[in-house]
Image (tube, rainbow, N blue to C red):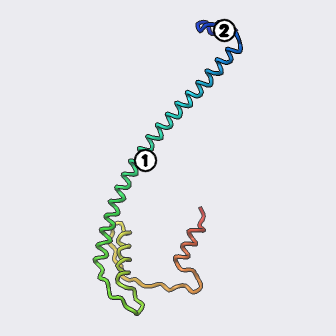
Amino acid sequence: MLTSFLPSIGTELFDDKGMLMAVITTSGILIVFVILLLLIIIFYAYGGIFRAVTASKEKKLAAQKAADDAEKAKISEEAVSAVQPAAPSDDGSIPGEIIAVIAAAVAAMSGGKKYAVKKVSRTQKPTGGRTAWASMGVYENTRPF
């Protein structure tokens, strides 16, 4: 019966049904493992391609970030050199070095626009409440996803 479908393979091998089942099972298992091996090779190749593309994008972003950082450093150096540090005073005013750092931070974050720091003053600490840093920490740790 089954041997009529396989006329050219040598029907004498498949006279026994057990032998026929063994050949079909073995060939099925081999085909499955060969296909799995091919899929592993294909996915590994795709992974290599995507890693290469991602690495080239990351190199471009790193170069762009380095150029941006150099420009920001140049702007902040100009801002620091533009502010003359004042002598520290004991009357509770803010020293000139601190004002220069604040001006440099504003210049670095301005994105190329020109800003001027006109006034820097201390804030009053809240009585019994959290400071601004503590409030921001609580907010960051308790905000919803």
Residue 37, picture quadrant: top right
47 sits to left or right of 20: left
Q: Quadrant of the C terminus?
A: bottom right
**Badge 1 vs badge 2, beta-carbon distance below 8 Å:** no
Residue at (35% x, 81% y) in the render: 97
Q: Quadrant of the N terminus?
A: top right
125 sits to left or right of 23: left
The residue that mark 1 highlights is: 54
Q: Secondary structure at mark 2?
A: helix
On screen, residue 122 above or below 71: below
Residue 34: x %, y % from top left: 55, 27
Residue 28: x %, y % from top left: 62, 23
Image depth: mark 1 or mark 2 in front: 2
Could you tell me the amino acid type at mark 2? Answer: Thr
Residue 73, picture quadrant: bottom left
Residue at (59% x, 24% y) in the render: 30
Give the label on residue 3, or none: 2
Numbered label tally: 2
Give the label on residue 111, or none: none
On screen, residue 38 above or below 67: above
On screen, residue 28 above or below 20: below
Residue 104: x %, y % from top left: 35, 74
On screen, residue 108 above or below 38: below
Residue 117, picture quadrant: bottom left
Could you tell me the amino acid type at mark 1? Answer: Thr
**Residue furthest bottom in the image:** 91
Residue at (52% x, 78% y) in the render: 132
Mark earlier in primary sequence (1, 2): 2
Instruction: Characterize the local packing of mark 1: few (<14), some (14-19) or many (20 or more) Cα atoms within 10 angstroms.
Output: few
Report, in whole angstroms, how far the alpha carbon at label 1 lies from the one at label 2: 55 Å
Pick the front one: 31 or 12 = 12
Q: Secondary structure at mark 1?
A: helix
